[in-house]
Structures are given as C-alpha cells and as structure tokens.
Amino acid sequence: MSDSNTTTFTNPSIFILLGIPGLEAAHGWISIPFCVMYIVAILGNLTILYIVKREPSLHEPMYYFLCMLAVTDLVLSSSIVPKTLSIFWFNSREINFGACLTQLYVINSVAAMESGIFVAMAFDRYMAICHPLRYSTILTNRIVAKIGFIAVLRGGILVLPYPLLARQWPYCRTNIIPHSYCKHFSVVSLACADIRPSSYYSVSVTFFVPSVDGFLIAVSYTQILRAIFRLPTKDARLKAFGTCGSHLCAILAFYIPDLFASLMQRVGSNVPLPVLILIANMYLLVPPMLHPIIYGVRTKQIRDRLLWIVTQKRA
C-alpha cells in the first residue's frame, strides 16, 4: 500500500493525511464545529460581496478593500475545509502530490495576501481621517486596484519557493502526513534530505510578513489616534473611532490567532500533537468566520443594507 512506512520512493504520487492523530474516534464530533464555521464564513463573506456590489453608495475604497478581504477569506477557508471534512466523514485521506503542494502554496500565499490587504485598509483609514480632503484624489479606483494587485503579487511571489523547494526533495521515508491538511513543515519534514534552505526561508517569511505589516499598521493607527484626539468635539471623536473600530477588530481577529499558533509551535514539544493540529485549523478557520460578522455588526452602511434586504424579502 502507498501508506506503508517502509515504502521507498523519491516522488510520491500521493500523500496520506491522518486528520487529527489520536482523536480519530472524535472526528465526527469535531467535524460539526468545523462545518458550522465554514458555512458561516462562506455565507458571511458572500453576503458582504453581494451587498457591496448591489449598493452604489458602498462603491468606495474602504469597501473595495473589504471585498478583497472577503475573497481571500473564501479562498483560505475553502482551501482546507472540504478536504478536512472528507477525511472526517468519509475517511478520504489520500491527496495527490501535486494537489498537496498546491494546497500548501495557496494557504500560505493567501495568508500573506490577506496581511497585505490589512495594511491597505489601515492606509485607507489613515487617509480618510488624517487627510480627508485628499482622500478621493489619492485613493482612486485605479490606485485601489494597483494596491490590491501588489498585495496579491507579493503574497504569491514570497511563498512561491515553498512548493518549488518541496518538490525537489526526495521523499524516501513515508508519505503519511500527521495532519488534516498539507502544512508546509509537515510536508517537508518527510523528506530524506537537508531541508534547511526550505526551513530557513519559511521561518524568514513567517517573521518578515507579520513584522513588516504589523509595523505599518501600527504606524498608521498611531497617526489615526493622534488625529482623532485632536478633534474638537466628543461626537466627532466617537464617529472617527467608529469608522476604525471594525478594521481594528478584524485585524486583531487575524493576527491574534496567528500569534497564538506561532507561540504554540515554538513550545510544541510540550503541547500534544492533536492540540497543535486543532490550533493550526482554528487559525485558518476563525478569521474568515469572524470578519463578515465584525463588519456586519460594526459597519452601519453594511448593517443597514443587510436589514433592508431582509425586511424586503419578508415583505
């Protein structure tokens, strides 16, 4: 069988995903919250895209960036959940070697793209609050499209070496991956070769992207807060805080699980493998589920439009 620990091969045709080793008996129960979160993420992000498309008053840079975020959330959650649920429900553990590397690439590149979109959203709020008179002249549709393209291109190029390096390693130990999806380190650690170039590069990207993007976001919001506290009235300050609140909540929903997952990996020797795998899944599932909820609750224009659609259908 292809999942034998003693099989020798240099380029496996398939990998075997174990799901969550040690919790096989609970796979059915674990699939329930996974499925619920995925459905909420899909419906929520599709609703955001629908509302922004149908409402002309929302055709502004802020909401264009929100649509980019919704698309990346849809791709990110859809890149892991269907296969994970097929493992839990149907014991469908096999994944093609090329499909595994594709999943590995999509997960990491889209996560990097999403981080770049958060930087763009922070810049959008900076321009809207600190330079309102220049906002519409600087953030034109063309500039917004260029910013989105740069975020996508950066994420795609930075992560491209992941699958390219992984493809060149010989795999002569086993093709069994003790995970529910093709996580980068879980895949390359199966290679019987010196994988230090791959490891060093992935660590560099993992450190570089959040550090640089987090710094840019912090600088933007420092300037935003300074501008808000200089506003003359309390109502003006509250209104400015309101326009930034949803963005800050969404940013925290993305970076806090990432930070928590990274910390757990650093102390992984003291944490059971099932817990690490669950954390790795939550990091990719929770933000796509929370983002549309955050924007639906905290953004008045989206909330009002959604309520109008619901009441019209009931009428």
Image (cartoon, rainbow, N blue to C red):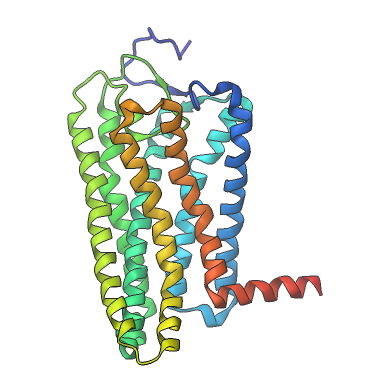
Q: Between residue 253 and residue 56, name the one nearer to us.
A: 253
Residue 187 in view: no
Would you say 208 lies left or right of 73 here?
A: left
Q: Quadrant of residue 122?
A: bottom left
Q: Between residue 247 and residue 150, name the one nearer to us.
A: 247
**Which residue is at 41% across, 32% downward?**
276
Q: Examine the rendered structure and indicate whether residue 271 appears above or below residue 63.
A: above
**Which residue is at 31% across, 14% downward?**
172
Q: Residue furthest front?
A: 234
Q: Examine the rendered structure and indicate whether residue 298 appears above or below residue 226.
A: above
Would you say 160 lies left or right of 136 here?
A: left
**Which residue is at 18% across, 33% downward?**
197
The C terminus - image quarter: bottom right
Q: Position of residue 202 (x, y in %)?
A: 25, 40
Q: Position of residue 223 (x, y in %)?
A: 26, 76
Would you say 205 lies left or right of 287 here?
A: left
